[in-house]
Image (cartoon, helix red, strand yellow):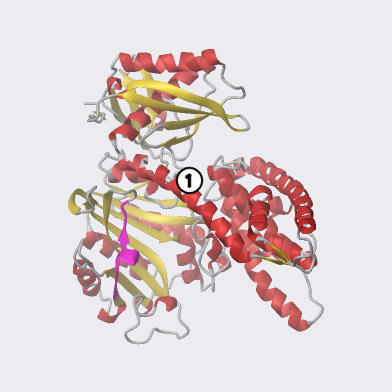
Amino acid sequence: MKSLSTNQLRQAYLDFFRSKGHAVIPSAPLVPENDPTVLFTTAGMHPLVPYLLGEPHPAGKRLTDVQRCIRTQDIDEVGDNTHLTFFEMMGNWSLGDYFKKEAIELSFEFLIRVLEIPLEKFAVTVFEGDSDAPRDEESADIWKSLGVPTDRVGYLPKAKNWWGPAGLTGPCGPDTEMFYWVGPTDLPPAGSNPATDDANWMEIWNDVFMQYNKKEDGTFEPLVQQNVDTGMGLERVAAVLQGADSVYGIDSILPIVKRLESFEHHIRKGSSEEENEKIALHLHRHGRIIIDHLKAATFMIADGVRPSNTDQGYILRRLIRRAIRSARQLMSEHTQGFCSFIASEVVIQYSEAYPFLREKENDIQQTLNFEEEQFSKALKEGSKQFEKIIESLGGKKEIDGISAFHLYDTYGFPIELTKEMAAEQKLTVDEDGFKKAFEAHQSLSRAGAEQKFKGGLADNSAETTKLHTATHLLNAALRHVLGDHISQKGSNITAERLRFDFNHPDKMTPEQVAAAEKIVNDAIAADLPISYHITTVEGAKQEGAIGVFDDRYASDIKVYTIGTRTDFASKEICGGPHVARTGMLGSFKIQKEESSSAGIRRIKAVVSGGPAEIELAKEEV
């Protein structure tokens, strides 16, 4: 195998697909723009949803990138050899161009020919088929024709080898996954593949074939535009190439591990060799949690997220506090500024690939230091509540689950911290009761997320498309009423309403709210035409388009104009989709204007009365 650094592997991937006719596009931000289906970008396909659904991409039908991602559903798995909260996903896409044969051949060529991964340590899985779609023998036969032995091809059900749809309906299809042998023997035994011997194979790449559309009645029909969407974890492949026993041993993460180890004089120590061995095993996981969570937090802050009690800010706060809690487990004493000290090494290791980390380093440091200070205060207040709980026990030796959850939900006390403090008082905690309270809280959160998911922009429904168009008019109206300093800081759209975040230091007056609302409704009443054209970032600047002009954009971009090129109500960089004329929006009403976080305001608004059937905006001719 080739021995490549993380930076070399990232570049080798992009160079390979560029040589195969793919346009290299930049990594999108961690917070998706105009996509309420997820809090964070969790895969390379998320920023491309409109194009996977048929919108033409300005860079063409073959694309490739390395996308920074955040996934929190596996947060409890962090600390093992492969799971990370922040990771980089290498991907390539065909938007109605090539399909299974060429996609599989490209994957095989890059892994086996370019990276020189031994074929004898390589295996794949394909969809085993069910009543909705047939067994994917086509993919299996392609792999076999390339030299993959029959016993290295496994068949798995939908839960393992099927992607999508993103919502209740939409594009979906079978996938084929690629694996590397990580078992106890040098080579896998005959008959071993991930379908029969899952624990000894590590997934490294996934090719998704979007060939079906799931309809509202639950049936599947062939897609008009069949797409390929692939994803390969940079860190996992780097671990394979570098012979690392975990993703924490690769060249970009190991220096962060070393920085943590520089706190050696603070590391907890036992009174005997046996006790120290137990402590080492216990603390090994906590060290990884610290590194993972603070790396994720560094990137989230650099992408504009700030700690709060809702949405992305809540996840960021949870990660930081979880890292601090692990530091308490790891260290005999906790030093203030510990988080920013670790984050500074993250900036050093990743700024070559992501230069904006250097530019945002001061923000990163200040945010982490402030949150660390706030959590220290929360610990102080939570400790007072803990004492009250102790007093209320009346001689009982167990803290009930509801009280433990209250400490978690209100003061940010992880259950492990409550157990630790209880043990010091020779008390136990009702963990089952805590889990029930926690699961009830999760169910409520999940229900809210599912409602957000159900009506997401990814469904391209008439209502979400109308509301997406309305955000452009609102953005322009706010700039007219409040000033040109206004820029979008977040957007969340369901089928029922839009939510738009923007920078502004003061609460809007009722007169300002009414003025912004009137501007939008005047534009709707004028029934202005909406279209898009493809230009460069520099061209968009020159024609007065709104956008965050940074490295998120490729050389060619789409600019949506509401009105005409010379007489426009709004001109904004966007991927779409939008309605063809503003009159389709019906009417616009601002329901609420409120604070989102420091210096950020939030508007919630609705549209009503427009037609049920809409026409989409088209490219100018």
Percent position of residue 438, x then y: 57, 56
Query: Dot 1 corresponds to which residue?
Result: 39
Does residue 531 lie above or below 202 as drawn? above
Residue in view at x 62 percent, y 43 percent:
307
Residue 431 can be seen in this image: yes
Q: Is residue 37 left or right of residue 130?
A: right
Residue in view at x 59 percent, y 22 percent:
507
Residue 543 can be seen in this image: no
- Residue 136: within the magenta? no
**Crowd rating for badge 1 (residues with CA inside 10 Å; few <14, some 14–19, many 20+):** some
Does residue 549 lie above or below 186 as drawn? above
- Residue 160: within the magenta? yes
Q: Disc 1 marks which amino acid?
A: Leu
Does residue 334 lie above or below 453 as drawn? below
| Segment tinted magenta in the rendering | 154-165
At numbered mark 1, what does the secondary structure look like: helix, strand or loop? Answer: loop
* Residue 363 picture quarter: top right
